[in-house]
Amino acid sequence: MRRKSAYMLAAAVLSAALLAGCGNNGGNAGNSGNAGNAGNSGSGSGNANANADAGSGNAAKQDVVTIKYVIPGTEPASWKEVRDAVNKKLLADGVNVQIDEQYIDWAAWDQKLNLMLSTGADFDMFQVMNDVVSLSNYIARGAVKDISAELNEYGSNIKTAISDDIFNAVTKDGKIYGIPANWMEPAVVDLFTSNDFLLKKYGIDSKVATPQEMLDAMAQLYDKAPAPKPQFPFTLSNVSATGMDFLHRTFDSFPFDVRDGIAMINNDGTVKDWVDTDEFKQESAFFRQAYEKKLINPDVLTLKQDQVQKEAGKMNWGFEMGTLANTQAALDKDLPGAKLGDFSLQEFNPEKGHYRFTNAKNLNVVAANSKHPDAVIQFLNWLYANQDNYDLFMYGIEGKTYKKTGDKSMEAILDPKTQASLIPNADWMIGNLNFIRVGDIVTATRKLYEPDKDAKNFISSGFFFDATPVKTELGNVKAVITSDIAPIYAGVVDYDGHIAQAQQKLKAAGVDKVIAEYQKQLDAYLAGAAK
């Protein structure tokens, strides 16, 4: 669940063991102790005035209301007990709000959430993964509320915990559309993880400097390992969002960003049709070679997201985009003999530096049909008021669902029946670096929680696209991406034989209008940023 890269590549939501976009991201959500720490360990913690301010002074005058938070994943066994404890503390702290969560299985997330939004279902807050379905997409559909007024009235702790430059990424024309989950260092989105344990087991060098070296290493591993054969966990969600970030670094044109699977934002401020670039062609060639060598699942186009997550979580691969949240207990089960230090984060062309391409990979928004937007902000303001509130909601009941192992660290307690983590919520969905506790996770993943002082904000890191003027065209373009572009990019069909027809369909769908609107809005954003 991380790009939930950092990427979560998390996230783009690759596995229950992945944190990108997108953060990975998996499971309900990283309930395997994949919390982290690297922010200001003192911020908000032990603040004597924090709980007094959690309700912004107005809650006592209100009736108690219950808000429903809709998130992807499976309900943890501990949630109801933790929920009751959270709700009890909310009232004790003078916040007349109660919280409940509705879980949607990963395989049905997009479909069911879209149905709830289109039918006006009664719920208040939901998770947005910008590297899967962008905030701009939801705004164009009228699915989210502007929460500027509520944030100004009830959100003092939120504003303290989240900086203005991060809020800029969810602000359009002075309207604020979401609360970012400031849970990671965004500059690690274009890294990948190598399974050093498995590669070393078969005498293969895990250090790779080029995409071809990566392919060669994966091919060697495939040939040497027994069935089931190790394969690269490919997720289609990235095709319609950012592309495979780790490959972007290999081009002379880097840094650049890909949005909505179609808009390539270059460092000079120009926007191009991503599918019409040489970079897209070369990345497609990478996956075509992988597909032909059986290094990715032959059913990649039909695999459900939960199937990809399950396979990725088994650790039967040499390289994986993004980072891992696996605990030692998970490794003992899925990769016997492996230790937390047996994985490395790598990147192509490290001399090119690091960039933050988005300051709001994951965020939470108020549903357009919500009757209680003020209560949502009051709850989040309480959550970010202090360490105690954060610990209770995110990690649960100390001694029952987790153990504190240090000032900013913890250990997840496992369900004795299922060996699943009892931690109720996920930092990548709603967390904040000021309060995150690092769990017993793969050592290399800790880089997620270490601010990169040398990283630069990309020119569009605070920009988000309002698709309203071209919502019909963008919808049509997205349909072509699914039907024609995804098979090319995933390597299922060859580029040369299919790209012309795909580009014709994109033209007919209105891609030129979408790119022109992207350019118009980016120009306006950059002009405003220069003032």
Image: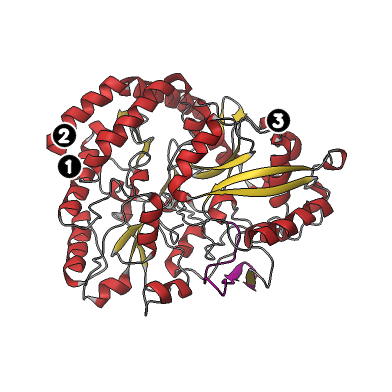
Q: Is residue 351 above or below residue 365?
A: below
Neighbours of disc 3 within 10 Å: few (<14), some (14-19), many (20+):
few
User: Which residue is the site of mark 2?
Assistant: 498
Neighbours of disc 1 within 10 Å: few (<14), some (14-19), many (20+):
some
Boundaries of the magenta span: 404-425
Distance of mark 1 from mark 3, alpha carbons?
Answer: 50 Å
In the image, which disc is placed on residue 149? 3
User: Which residue is the site of mark 1?
Assistant: 493
114 vs 315, nearest the viewer:
114
Q: Quadrant of residue 261?
A: top left
Q: Position of residue 486 (x, y in %)?
A: 27, 40
Secondary structure found at label 3: helix
Q: Position of residue 475 (x, y in %)?
A: 39, 27
Asked whether, in this view, residue 166 is left or right of residue 252, the answer is right
Neighbours of disc 2 within 10 Å: few (<14), some (14-19), many (20+):
some
Q: Position of residue 246 (x, y in %)?
A: 32, 51
Q: What's under tag 1, amino acid-wise?
A: Val
Asked whether, in this view, residue 102 is left or right of residue 381, the answer is left
Q: Nearer the viewer, mark 1 or mark 3?
A: 1
What is the tally of numbered marks visible in this picture?
3
Distance of mark 2 from mark 3, alpha carbons?
Answer: 49 Å
Asked whether, in this view, residue 289 is left or right of residue 306, the answer is left
**Res 265 visible:** yes
